[in-house]
Amino acid sequence: MMRCPWCLGEPIYVKYHDEEWGSPVRDSQKLFESLILDGAQAGLSWITILKRREGYRIAFDGLNPEKIAVYGDRDVERLMADSRIIRNKRKILSAIENARAYCAMSMPLSDWIWGFVDNTPIINHFKTLQEIPATTKLSEKISQELKRLGFSFVGPTIIYAFMQAVGMVNDHLVDCFRHELRKDS
């Protein structure tokens, strides 16, 4: 079975690739989680975050934005001491800011984010990893809009990775068995 080569060598990566990456996610809570984890990944490898994902879910109250939005200084201190997550104060504060921005949105995140692609994933037909861009005009636009709404750690590269992860864009290589799969979650 052919897979995208970036996932080879680590069972957790293969499982993520085979079961999640690129599958359209329409649940606002899951989209928020992905946005927080992609922001936490800035400057790190995705596998670092993937291995700590469950730790993030535990440390951040299930990555529930309504709960995170009311975090205060004690929560920041608690999170800074939690070895299950990346203990970067800027990233922790960003998660809290993003939860507050999420809660202030006038529409569900799912409706808002999927509106940028008319609720239909963009299907690319790349043959090599080198063809896949790090950013696009669309990721730049979404990044700007998220920042305008008060989100942080949402630069164009982070947003493109987010778009790939949640299936807004299908960047599975054409010879990957997942390229044609479009299962919503």
Image (spheres, rainbow, N blue to C red):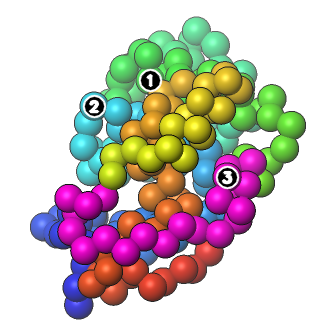
Q: Position of residue 167 (x, y in %)?
A: 52, 65
Q: CA distance from mark 3 to mark 1?
A: 26 Å
What secondary structure is found at the residue carrying circle 1? helix
Q: CA distance from mark 3 to mark 2?
A: 26 Å
Let me know if residue 122 appears in the view: yes
Residue situated furthest left in the rendering? 9
Camera-near label (3 vs 1) is 3
- Relative to 49, is 141 on the left or the right? right
Q: Earlier in the sequence, mark 3 or mark 1?
A: 1
Q: Nearer the viewer, residue 108 or 99?
A: 108
Q: Which residue position holds label 3? A: 116
Q: Residue at x 54, y 24 (%)?
A: 152
Residue numbers of the magenta segment: 112-132
Q: Position of residue 50 (x, y in %)?
A: 34, 51
Q: CA distance from mark 2 to mark 1?
A: 11 Å
Q: Position of residue 170 (x, y in %)?
A: 45, 68
